[in-house]
Image (cartoon, rainbow, N blue to C red):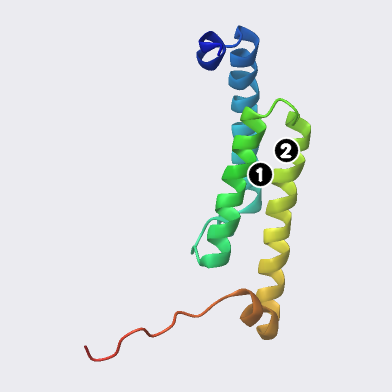
Amino acid sequence: MNLEGMFFQSWSGIVRTVLVGSLAYATLVVFLRISGKRTLAKLNAFDLVVTVALGSILSAIILQETISLAEGATALALLIFLQFVVTFWSVRSARFANAIRSEPALLARKG
């Protein structure tokens, strides 16, 4: 077992993590600013899933060397665009909104 490789592999991996991580984070912030407040506002179950997915994509960009910054930025942009499309159609179609959003269920009444 190589204990050294478990704690430290190379400076190039650390430099890549810092550079790509910083750029990916900045890209996500720019995309969220462009998309508006709706992307992360009023977190219902669907919005929470999108937010968690954004975080998952960001972590994959930072930690997986097989994913380039351009590919990761494309994935972030695609997810934010799809969130915009879903929001657009849920505002304009009650049937679509009902299919996407879930209403809270009453678990107890009067005690």
Q: Position of residue 5 (x, y in %)?
A: 57, 12
The one nearer the camera, 13 or 75, is 13
* Amino acid of disc 2: Ala
Can residue 33 be seen at all in this image of the molecule?
no
Q: Residue at x 71, y 25 (%)?
A: 65
Q: Measured along the vertical axis of the image, is residue 68 above or below residue 12?
A: below
Residue 66's image quarter? top right
Whether residue 44 sits left or right of residue 62 in the image: it is: left
Q: Position of residue 26 (x, y in %)?
A: 61, 32
Residue located farthest toward the front when viewing the structure as drawn: 1
The one nearer the camera, 81 or 12, is 12
* Crowding near the residue tagged with mark 2, few <14, some 14–19, many ≥20 C-alpha atoms within 10 Å: many
Whether residue 84 sits left or right of residue 1 in the image: it is: right
The mark total stands at 2
Task: Check the picture and name the quadrant holding the N terminus.
Answer: top right
The secondary structure type at the circle numbered 2 is helix
Q: Residue at x 58, y 19 (%)?
A: 18
Q: Position of residue 105 (x, y in %)?
A: 43, 83
Residue 73: mark: 2
Residue 46's image quarter? bottom right
Q: Are marks 1 and 2 in contact (CB under 8 Å)?
A: yes
* Amino acid of disc 1: Phe
Q: Measured along the vertical axis of the image, is residue 30 above or below residue 111?
A: above
Q: Which residue is mark 1?
A: 31
Q: Residue at x 60, y 43 (%)?
A: 56
Task: Check the picture and name the quadrant holding the C terminus.
Answer: bottom left
